[in-house]
Image (cartoon, helix red, strand yellow):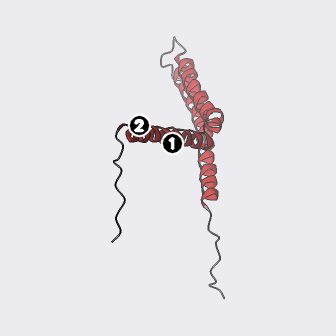
Amino acid sequence: MFFKQKKNPALDREQHELLEHAQKRIRQKRAVFQHLVILVIGSLFFAVINKVLKIGDPHDWYIWVVMGWSFIWFIHLAQVFITDPFLGKDWERSQRERLLEKQKERIRQIEAEIEKTYPLPELPPKEEL
C-alpha cells in the first residue's frame, strides 16, 4: 500500500532525443546569460581599477577590454540564438543521411565496375546423383 511502485512509462527514442535537445538548449541559454552577468561585473571591475585606483590613469584602457569582451559575448549570443537553431540536430541528421547516400552510391558504382572488369566465372550446373 505505502510502497506501491509508480508506473513510469519508458520514453521512446524520439522523446528522449527531444528531451536531451531541450536540456542542451537550456544549458546554452543559461551560459549566455551567465556570460553576460560576468561581463557586466568584469566591466565594472576594470572601470574601478582604471578610474578609482588610477592604474594606467592617463589612458582609458578599460574601454578596450570591455569592447573586446563584449564582442566575444556577441559571438556567443549569435552562436546560441542564431547559428544553433539553423544548424542544429535536424541539419546534422540531413547532412549525415546525404553523405551516407553518397557513400552507398559510390560503393554500388565500385561493385558494378569490379563485376564488369573481373566477372565471376559461371559454374556448370550441378549434376544430380
Q: Residue 84 at what x, y percent from top left?
A: 61, 37
- Judged from this view, the residue extending furthest toward the bottom is 1
Q: Is residue 87 left or right of residue 53?
A: right
Q: Is residue 117 left or right of residue 97?
A: left
Assess whether mark 2 and mark 1 are in contact (beta carbons under 8 angstroms).
no
> Going 63% across and 39% down the picture, which residue do you hit?
33
Q: Secondary structure at mark 1?
A: helix
| Residue type at tag 1 | Leu
Q: Residue 125 at what x, y percent from top left?
A: 37, 59
69 lies above or below 123: above
> Going 36% across and 37% down the picture, which residue do you hit?
117
The crowd level at tag 1 (other Cα within 10 Å; few <14, some 14-19, many 20+) is few
- Judged from this view, the residue extending furthest toward the top is 58
Query: Is the C terminus in the top left, top right, bottom left or bottom right quadrant?
Result: bottom left
Residue located beneath label 2 in the image: 113
Q: Is residue 116 left or right of residue 74?
A: left
Residue located beneath label 1 in the image: 100
Name the front one of labels 1 and 2.
2
> Going 36% across and 43% down the picture, which residue do you hit?
119
Q: Is residue 4 left or right of residue 107?
A: right
- Residue 31 lies in quadrant: top right
* Front residue of this view, candidates 51 and 71: 71
- Residue 91 lies in quadrant: top right
115 lies above or below 71: below
112 lies above or below 68: below
Query: Is the N terminus in the top left, top right, bottom left or bottom right quadrant?
Result: bottom right
- Dot label at residue 49: none
* Front residue of this view, candidates 49 and 75: 75
* Front residue of this view, candidates 125 and 42: 125
Q: Residue 46 at what x, y percent from top left?
A: 53, 26
